[in-house]
Image (cartoon, helix red, strand yellow):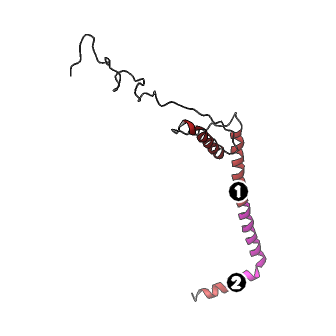
Amino acid sequence: MAGYGGLVGFVLLRARAHRLLLAAALLTVLLTTTVLATLTAYSGAIGDAALRHALADPRTGADAALIVKAAVPAEQRPAADATVRAGAAKTFEGLPRTVRTLVRSERAGPNRPGGVRPAGVPGRRPGPGPGARRGRRATA
C-alpha cells in the first residue's frame, strides 16, 4: 500500500485542479440516471393504461373466465352468489365484467342411480349388451 501513496496524492492534486470538470461529470451521471428511472416508470404506467383501455373496449377486449364450482345448499346460494360477485369485482376491478350463475342438479348425472349410460357401461340396467347375439343366452 505504501506504493499507492504517491498515486493517490497525484490523483487528489489533479482532482483539485479540475473541480469544474469533475462536477460536470458527476452532474451528467446524475441526470442520466434520473432520466432513465423516469422513463422506466413512465413506460410502465403507459403500458398499464393502454392495457386497461384495450380491455375496456368490447370490440378489442379479450374474454377472461373466472369459473367457480361449489356444492352449495339451496338456502346458502344467495350468500355464495354475492361472495363470488364481490370476488369478481375485486379481481377485475375497473374492467367490464358479466357474472352468470348456473345451477345444476347432481341427481340425474351419468354416474348416479337412474342416470343415462351408454350401452355396455357397467352399472347399466339389465338388458343385452353390445356383444350379445340374438337367440343365445350368456352363460356364466
- Give the SS element for disc 1: helix
Front position in the image: 26 or 9: 26
Q: Position of residue 22 (x, y in %)?
A: 74, 75
In the picture of the structure, the residue carrying the numbered disc 2 is 12
Q: Which residues are magenta?
A: 10-35
**Most common secondary structure along the magenta stretch:** helix
Query: Which tag is nearer the camera, tag 2 or tag 1?
Result: 1
Q: State the quadrant of the C terminus.
A: top left
- Give the farthest residue toward the right: 20
Depicted 113 relative to depicted 48: above or below: above
Res. 41 mark: 1
Q: Is residue 15 magenta?
A: yes
Q: Position of residue 89 (x, y in %)?
A: 66, 44
Instruction: Please name the amino acid that badge 1 sits on.
Output: Ala
> Is residue 108 found left or right of 45 in the rendered image?
left
Find the distance from the CA under tag 2 to the CA under tag 1. 38 Å
- Give the SS element for disc 2: helix
- Give the farthest residue toward the left: 140
Q: State the quadrant of the N terminus.
A: bottom right
